[in-house]
Amino acid sequence: MNCARVRELLLELPDAAVPSVDRPGVEAHLAACPDCQRLHDTLMRVDRGLSQHLRAPALDAGFRARLNARLALDRRHVWADWLPAAVHFTSCGVATVVCVAMLPDQAGLVMAAAAGITVVSHFLLTTAHSALDAAGD
């Protein structure tokens, strides 16, 4: 295991804990590399110091219910953000299929029409989405 991978594992994991699958390689590397060993020791000292001085706040009984309600609200916002893109994609696909059906031998015209419809529908949907956002604020 190389220094870059060991440092990545040490920095991204809490408490400088290393997954058991990587532990033998990391331990062997730390035994042979003083720089990585110093980083590991420093991370452990920082973790111990933070653990001594920072305590998790006491949470009241309704915290979990409020958190779940907030997460549910956030999921609805994601759906609202995603919906205009789905409508745009679908309308552009339908418009392109209609153009191909009406003009089967006019590839250039179909592409121009599809591009024009895409730009116009994107503008309309973006405007509608912005108006809905402004109304929600």
Image (cartoon, rainbow, N blue to C red):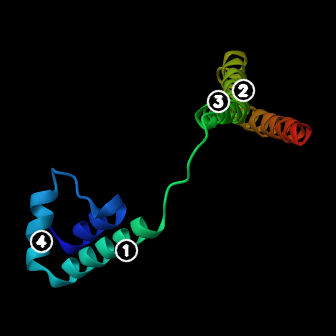
Q: CA distance from mark 3 to mark 1?
A: 36 Å
Q: Residue 27 shows which numbered tag?
A: none
Q: Secondary structure at mark 4?
A: helix
- Rendering quarter of residue 26: bottom left
Residue sitting nearer the eye, 117 or 61? 61
User: Which of the two discs, 2 and 1, sits closer to the camera?
Assistant: 1
In the image: residue 15, left or right of residue 126: left
Q: Where in the figure is residue 72, as x and y percent of width and height?
A: 64, 30
Q: Which residue is mark 3?
A: 72
> Are the residues flagged by discs 4 and 2 in contact, CB closer than 8 Å?
no
Q: Which residue is mark 2?
A: 87
Q: CA distance from mark 3 to mark 2?
A: 23 Å
Q: Earlier in the sequence, mark 4 or mark 2?
A: 4
Q: CA distance from mark 4 to mark 3?
A: 45 Å
> Are the residues flagged by discs 3 and 1 in contact, CB closer than 8 Å?
no
Residue sitting nearer the eye, 130 or 2? 2
Q: Which residue is mark 4?
A: 29
Q: Residue at x 73, y 16 (%)?
A: 102
Residue sitting nearer the eye, 98 or 31? 31
User: Which of the two discs, 4 and 1, sits closer to the camera?
Assistant: 1
Q: Which residue is mark 1?
A: 46
Q: Secondary structure at mark 2?
A: helix
Q: CA distance from mark 2 to mark 1?
A: 50 Å
Q: CA distance from mark 4 to mark 1?
A: 21 Å
Q: Where in the figure is residue 34, as x and y percent of width and height?
A: 16, 84
Residue type highlighted by circle 4: His
Residue sitting nearer the eye, 31 or 99? 31
Residue type highlighted by circle 3: Ala
Is 128 drawn above or below residue 101 in the view shown?
below
> Are the residues flagged by discs 2 and 1 in contact, CB closer than 8 Å?
no
> Are the residues flagged by discs 3 and 2 in contact, CB closer than 8 Å?
no
Residue type highlighted by circle 1: Val
